[in-house]
Image: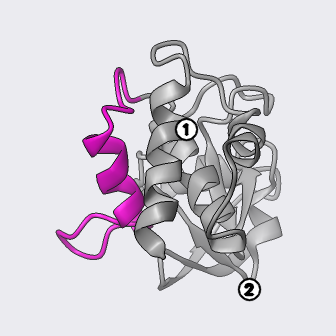
Amino acid sequence: MRLAFEINSEPVELEIKPNQTLLEVIRRDLALTGTKDGCGIGECGVCTVLLDGWPIRSCLALAMDARGRKVTTIEGLAQGSHLHPLQESFIKHAAIQCGFCIPGMLMVGKALLDENPRPTEDEVRASIAGNLCRCTGYTKIVEAILAASEDRG
């Protein structure tokens, strides 16, 4: 099947199998490996990408669901060598340990801040609740997202 969509502001057109997940296309066909492959059943959140600005589990979405739409992966956050302010905040607040969960955390954090530029701590915690982290205990991640929201306004 022919799939055409936009990924990280770039048009893409490729031939895929009808049962391929968006995660498979992103990682294998497009070689964008920042989106991680974790549980494969939508439980961990490491494969989170933005589809038309909304966070989704790419391991659960068929690639054809992206037809004609806009996908943003972790690679699409930075502008060239300039990190996105949320990425900078994660670094500044030591919110990264092993780094495996961080792409998914950044994507849900970005979606939250795009929708609600000044979230409360409870809203941040609710937004990341579906993303598992075994290293940080979430506190630094919450602090980083809140700090990025303060820097916006």
Question: Residue visible at 61% across and 26% down?
Answer: 38
Q: Is residue 76 magenta?
A: yes
Which segment did they paint magenta?
75-99
Residue at which label 1 appears: 142
Question: Residue visible at 55% across and 38% down?
Answer: 142
Residue at which label 2 appears: 68
**Residue 14, horizontal then vertical, whole percent:** 58, 74
**Residue 34, horizontal then vertical, whole percent:** 41, 46
Disc 1 secondary structure class: helix
User: Can you tell which quarter of the image residue 119 is in?
Assistant: bottom right
| Viewer can see residue 30 | no
**Residue 17, horizontal then vertical, whole percent:** 73, 57
Q: Earlier in the sequence, mark 2 or mark 1?
A: 2
Q: Is 70 on the left-hand or right-hand side of 43?
A: left
Quadrant, the N terminus: bottom right
Residues 150 and 43: in front is: 150
